[in-house]
Image (tube, coloured by chain):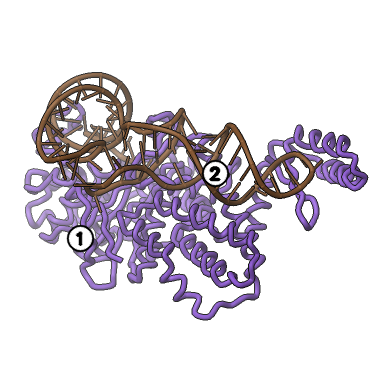
Chain colours: A purple, B brown
RNA sequence: GGCACCGUCGCCAAGUGGUAAGGCAGAGGUCUGCAAAAUCUCUAUCGGCGGUUCGAGUCCGCCCGGUGCCUCCA
């Protein structure tokens, strides 16, 4: 299946041709670890995790690097506020990152470089930039000279004149040009510092990604990802740095995910209108969050709202119920060459077609819904002659789920976790519910429909929904 | 001010120029003692106005409305 993806650099969909056949080098900007992750981070996590999984699904050997920015002004400020060493702040939030992203079923990348483990690489890149006349030392601060890079602004579609007339350029006497940005920051007393040819200091934000990307993926690699907000200045500066140092463009395909909005407005730290992932987990299942995050195309903005999350919860619940019933029927069966049948199924073909069109997860999920309907119908028919078909559909569904990072729990586990979340609000008295159900079943046996309905009405009022099955009466929370 | 992007059913959301996927909600049928679940059927001409074309949601222009980037930010 030929993969096409939208390249932010050229602003169009392009055929994906890796630099090295069957191999992909991918770098995604991680987080600055000074606080808990919010839903925006969750989206970037889910989007690039899905891309990573799909590339592997296509058979590529993927070298995937995602960094931790563990030295930065914000980290230092946070440490000072709390009166703790900065390392304590970063360790805490790296730990929290793993917890939050782990629940979202985000796979661990091939490498996860930390900025502070790569100071020598950054120093050497900066030195090389100075040598090539692309950077200058001003009293211990080193700046990149934007004028030295003719292509500056290509990724973000800006030209330096416009940037200069913009109202918000940083006025800094030490800079030759207001657009120049820091590669190395001289440290003040009591600030964390590393030795360098320009005196003690710490690296600027942009240089770390250039240095680590180069180290792990080479001077030019296939894919670089991140949120749209990183295009300028972060990624623009990365290009300038890497190109300046190596003379080669660092990245072939740039991929940027859209924002998570609250009431149509970008969710961000600076606006203060953000939800942390862990806040969401208190009320919503992580897998529901993941489904919500990938139900829209990754480049479009998504609006985070209770209604939208609840819709996703309904969809996922339906999937798990269908899977549970089908698994029951397929249990113990073993269709010969199941993998081949799955691979060549029309459903899998269409799934790959959708995903290969710039990772269209929205269409992929629509296809999953259609396949679920097929599975439900086959399950209901309970026709042993069609078990193979059901088994193939179920296996295909699971396989696409693996690409999307869904359906990896057992249905029972999912249902029980959902139950617990819902029950937190209602605080249901299980014994009372069981007793009412017993009463109702006694009444049903005696064909006392009035009393039976009364029992159910009482339960409905408590938020309990009944389901009479061949195996008995089951109940769940609405 | 500069540069991008977006406006599709009540809500969410896909859509390579050929006559609108999917989900939620809603209506009706099957099933059920009644329900639930499942399943079937039904519900939009795509912000507005022009233009290009045999044909446009899909390309061009203008207008209206919304968002983002230009400062740290996924």
Q: Front-most of B35 and A64?
A: B35
- Asked which secondary structure carries label 2, the reply is helix
- Name the chain letter of the residue that bears numbered label 1: A
Horizontal arrangement in the rendering, residue A118 relative to residue A87 (left or right): left
Q: How far across and how far down the image is residue A428, in percent? A: 77, 39
The N terminus of chain A is located in which quarter? bottom left
Quick check: can you spot residue A155?
yes
Say which residue appears at 54% left-offset and 65% top-offset: A394
Residue where numbered disc 2 is placed:
A278
Quick check: can you spot residue A165?
no
Say which residue appears at 68% left-offset and 47% top-offset: A419
Asked if A260 appears above or below A326 in the picture, the reply is: above
Residue A424 placement: quadrant: top right
Residue where numbered disc 1 is placed:
A124
Q: Label 2: how many residues lie within 10 Å, few (<14), some (14-19) or many (20+)?
A: some
Q: For marks 2 and 1, give the one nearer the viewer.
A: 2
Q: Front-most of A75 and A309?
A: A309
Q: How far across and how far down the image is residue A124, in percent? A: 20, 60
Question: Which residue is outermost to the right?
Answer: A446
- Tell me which label, 2 or 1, sits earlier in the chain: 1
Distance between the Cα atoms at labels 2 and 1? 39 Å
- Asked which secondary structure carries label 1, the reply is helix
Q: Front-most of B36 and A39?
A: B36
Residue A34 placement: quadrant: top left
Horizontal arrangement in the rendering, residue A397 relative to residue B1 (left or right): right
Say which residue appears at 33% left-offset and 67% top-offset: A63
The C terminus of chain A is located in which quarter? top right
């Amino acid at each position: 299946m030929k993969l096409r993806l939208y390249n932010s650099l050229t602003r169009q969909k392009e055929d994906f041709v890796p630099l090295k056949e069957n191999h992909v080098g991918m770098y995604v900007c991680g987080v600055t670890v000074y606080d808990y992750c919010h839903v925006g981070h969750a989206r970037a996590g889910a989007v690039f995790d899905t891309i990573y999984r799909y590339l592997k699904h296509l058979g590529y050997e993927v070298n995937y690097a995602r960094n931790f920015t563990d030295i930065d002004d914000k980290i230092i400020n946070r440490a000072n506020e709390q009166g703790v060493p900065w390392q304590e702040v970063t360790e805490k939030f790296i730990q929290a990152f793993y917890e939050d992203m782990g629940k979202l079923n985000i796979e661990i990348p091939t490498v996860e470089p930390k900025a502070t483990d790569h100071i020598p690489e950054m120093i050497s890149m900066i030195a090389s930039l100075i040598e090539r006349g692309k950077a200058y030392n001003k009293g211990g601060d080193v700046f990149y000279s934007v004028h030295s890079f003719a292509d500056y602004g290509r990724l973000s579609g800006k030209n330096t004149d416009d940037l200069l007339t913009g109202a918000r350029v940083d006025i800094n006497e030490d800079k030759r040009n207001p657009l120049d940005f820091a590669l190395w920051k001289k440290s003040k007393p009591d600030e964390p510092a590393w030795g360098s040819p320009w005196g003690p200091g710490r690296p600027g934000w942009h240089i770390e990604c250039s240095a680590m990307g180069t180290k792990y993926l080479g001077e030019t690699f296939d894919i670089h990802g991140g949120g749209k907000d990183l295009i300028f200045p972060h990624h623009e500066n990365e290009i300038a740095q890497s190109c300046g140092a190596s003379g080669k463009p660092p990245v072939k395909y740039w991929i940027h995910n859209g924002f998570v909005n609250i009431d149509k407005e970008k969710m961000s730290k600076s606006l203060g209108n953000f939800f942390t992932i862990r806040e969401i987990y208190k009320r919503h299942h992580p897998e529901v969050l993941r489904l919500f995050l990938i139900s829209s195309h990754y480049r479009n903005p998504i609006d985070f709202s209770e209604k939208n999350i609840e819709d996703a919860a309904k969809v996922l619940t339906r999937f798990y119920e269908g899977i549970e019933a089908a698994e029951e029927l397929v249990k113990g069966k073993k269709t010969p060459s199941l993998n081949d049948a799955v691979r060549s199924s029309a459903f899998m073909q269409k799934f790959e077609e959708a995903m290969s069109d710039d990772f269209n997860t929205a269409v992929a999920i629509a296809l999953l819904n259609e396949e679920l309907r097929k599975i439900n119908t086959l399950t209901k028919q309970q026709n042993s002659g069609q078990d193979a078909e059901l088994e193939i559909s179920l296996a295909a569904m699971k396989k696409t789920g693996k690409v999307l990072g869904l359906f990896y729990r057992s249905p029972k586990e999912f249902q029980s976790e959902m139950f617990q979340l819902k029950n937190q609000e209602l605080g249901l008295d299980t014994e009372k519910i069981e007793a009412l159900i017993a009463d109702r079943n006694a009444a049903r046996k005696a064909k006392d429909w009035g009393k039976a309905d009364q029992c159910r009405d009482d339960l409905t009022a408590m938020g309990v929904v009944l389901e009479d099955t061949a195996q008995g009466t089951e109940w769940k929370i609405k």
